[in-house]
Image (cartoon, helix red, strand yellow):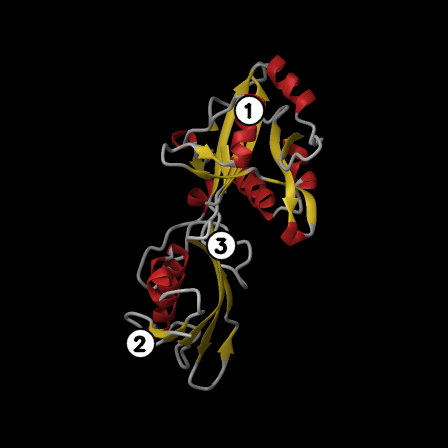
Amino acid sequence: MATFILPDSEPEVPVNLTSNLSQDQLLAFPAFKQWSETLKHSLSTQNKQSHTFYSSPYKLRKIDIQSVDFFGGKRLGFVKLRAEVSNDNGERLPGSVFLRGGSVGMMVSNDHPTSVWVTANDFQQLILQPDDVLERTENEKQVILALQPRIAAGSLSMAELPAGMLDDSGSFSGGAAKEIAEETGLEIPASDLINMTELAIPAASSDSDERLQQAVYPSPGGCDEFIPIFLWQKRVPRGQLKQWQGKLTGLREHGEKITLMLCPLDQVWKHGGRDGKVLAGWALYQALRQEGRI
């Protein structure tokens, strides 16, 4: 098992690697780089006399890499590690960390031409509305949810925001995005997205502020994943929406892994309530609309 010193660490932080992971691979992993730099800055804010831990600051002492997963045999995907963070009194902070990086979630709504919720692995919630309804109203809005297996949750049919990524062309892509395009013909360019988390969460304004992402952290007790949530709304002909309502029922054909369903916007918190991204997107959407910001 190889060990190296984390660059620019003070005090020096030894990093113990697994046999199948090199120093270069770990340091090049965006999720590790972002996590370590964010933690380093947060620890540095303890030197302010007003900080809760000023009198007995915590320090990163050691990192043990416990396991890693590679995607396609080559690309580093997930890292499980334990970080030893303690103060000089021997008090420790919980340090079990699962690194996977950011995700994206999207909500697509048809209120006025082209607006969506998105989460960074991207999750997209699409809201559709008949184009003969008065604009700037919430009447008859429908949200597209994806139903798919989520083994970590023990589910074979979890209702959630459709998942995907923003590809090199700036469009929402991935399995669920492909399903949406095949079933509805909808394609979602990044230029049409409204980042609701950036609107709601202020960025760090000084060096004394922690430099967290302007995003939702669904499991901050053990995972670095952060989810910016975007909004996309689109008005469609009533006949088209009615056709989709008959087609997007959530029923899956034999062997089909991902399917789609339309859910009334005012009911989405019930049907998608097990998915934290749905609840976060719904809450942001309601609050930002109440303040007249979207």
According to the picture, the residue beneath numbered tag 2 turns out to be 10
The Cα–Cα distance between marks 3 and 2, rounded to whole angstroms, is 26 Å
Q: Residues within 10 Å of mark 3 (few under 14, many from 20)?
A: many
Q: In the picture, residue 14 is in which quadrant?
A: bottom left
If you read the primary sequence from the N terminus, does the residue marked by circle 3 or circle 2 appear first? 2
Amino acid at pointer 2: Glu
Residue under the point 55% across and 35% down: 176
- Disc 2 or disc 1, which is closer to the eye? 1
168 left or right, relative to 118: left
| In the foreground, 70 or 261 | 70
- For disc 3, the marked residue is 225
Residue 182 marker: 1
Front residue of 134/35: it is 35
Q: In the rendered view, would you say 181 is above or below 75?
A: above
- Who's the residue at 69% across and 48% down the image? 155
In this rendering, would 69 be left or right of 210?
right
